[in-house]
Amino acid sequence: MTEFAERANSMGRTASAVLLGFTLFAGTIGGWIVLPKGAPAGDVAVVLWLNVAIVLTAIVVEARRRPYSLHLMHLVCMYLFMGAASLFQYSVGTLGVAGSINMVKGELLAAALAVSLWLLGYLSGYEFHHRFFAPRGVGAMGRFLMRPLTPGRVKIGLFAGLLVLVYLAVLGLAGVGTRMASREALEEHAVRAGASAFTQAYFLIHMWILRAFPMVALVAGMLLFGRNWRNRSLTLLLLILALAVGNAFANNPFAAPRMWFATAIFAFVSPFLLRRLSTGWAVVAIAVTGLTVLPALNWNRYAASFNELVDYFALVSPVDYLAHSSDVHSLGMTALCVRWVEAHGHRYGLQIAGALFSWFPRVFWPSKPIGTGKMVTEDLGFGFTNLSPSIPAEALVDFGLIGVPFFAAVVGVLFSRLDYIYWVRDRVAGRATVSVIELIYPFWIGCVIYITRGDMFGAFTMTAGFTVCILPFTLGMTRATWRSGRATAPEAPT
């Protein structure tokens, strides 16, 4: 590509990203204007608008760099759940389960500032690593994640995925089309197997690992088949087709929790469609469009058959959803977390540790923390406790306002590292093969939605479940082999 063409391409990406930012900002203003006002302008409103401005600026920068990334998805979710939703809900004067803004009036400013501090800390950590540390190389773990998957391992993984689908069919998931029906089938099997319904171990193994593995295997096969023409054998094609049909029949993503369903969508959209684009327009469009169907996905949990889905399914306005749904009540939930901290003090990392080790059996850790949303609402006397604090609220409970930006910076560095390893892989190893990180990264994109919105316990469990599924594809990659391959990184992508 000539220098002129490169410059024109860069200018085109910049113009597209800036237009995206203006479109989102105009949409935010338009939504705010049409909503009925139930709260006066003041310090809280100023901070909420500032949060929107900060995150939209960051979205513009990242949308110019890459068509999708962990970073972009986190920013989009911050804008939707903690930017626009918080602004809209404050404007109408009702904050989901927290109720009227007058009920948490004293905690609202701290709650809004927690998001500001998160954004500043997260963006500082991400950009600092992106500019100064990423160009130094990918490191040992990066070399492991960039190791190519052999066709033999992928075919074995596809065959194993088919066996898992047979087992899921035996559990009663064959032909199940709703979340409630799949849950009932798993509960019945748990009872028949002699376990109480949905013990932690049973749920982790069946929901977050066994149901995830055939999806990960299908992505692996599709990537290999589309990437390298030498490996386009009839056997590989037949395994892919069988796995695709099997997933639709015995592992229907629609019959799973909506976060799992959203993760599956982004896992198949990202590497096969979004990667062809030059900016992040599509990610934002998919996320905003998803707001129109989230209520239907929520109501779907109560539908036991396809016939009931007709009554439950309905599209809503994204503005109405953000302004009134308790699914995105970040501001109110964070305000409740502020009140809880004032009464009980900080947890000093115990909640984050509990989330990271949520898979650890409680019988061996009797004092293992419960989910932050349940803990906060129970202690504050709420009857409904199935609530999800956002990740800034989790940091607030553990470390207070002072600790929020520091924890955010750690998350920023981690996301920056993983983004860099994934996108620099092309320049180091080429596009002829499929690497380990290419197999799991598309699923991480979807998991970021859950991690950002909360709650952290469920989000980390789901992320760990998908991540564990790559291990069978890495068998034989000893420490010596993945440390020996040189994968020094070129200049950081901009």
Image (cartoon, rainbow, N blue to C red):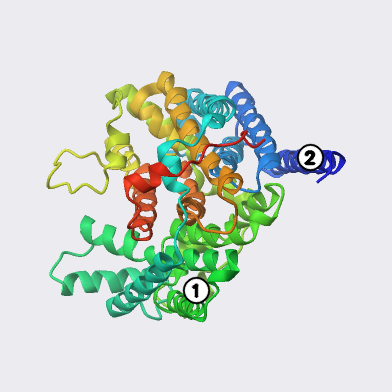
Percent position of residue 481, x then y:
37, 48
The image quadrant that residue 388 belongs to is top left
* Sooner in the amino-acid sequence: mark 1 or mark 2: 2
Q: Secondary structure at mark 2?
A: helix
| Mark 1 residue type | Leu
Q: Residues within 10 Å of mark 1 (few under 14, many from 20)?
A: some
Quadrant assignment for the C terminus: top right
Which of the two marks, 1 or 2, is nearer to us in this view?
2
Asked whether 188 or 332 is in front, the reply is 188
In this view, 286 is above or below 43? below
Percent position of residue 82, x then y:
54, 37
Query: In this figure, what is the number of numbered marks?
Result: 2
| Mark 2 residue type | Ser
In this view, 99 is above or below 175? above
The image quadrant that residue 268 belongs to is bottom right
Name which residue lies at 50% across and 28% down.
Answer: 118
Name which residue lies at 39% across and 42% down.
Answer: 483
Q: Farthest residue toward the right?
A: 4
Percent position of residue 469, x then y:
36, 58
Name which residue lies at 39% across and 50% down.
Answer: 463
Horizontal placement of 34 versus 271: left or right? right
Asked whether 120 or 401 is in front, the reply is 120
Which numbered tag is attached to residue 309?
A: 1
State whether residue 363 appears in this view: yes
Which numbered tag is attached to residue 376?
A: none
Percent position of residue 100, x then y:
49, 36
- The alpha-carbon separation of the residues under discs 1 and 2 comes to 46 Å
Q: Which residue is mark 2?
A: 10
Q: Secondary structure at mark 1?
A: helix
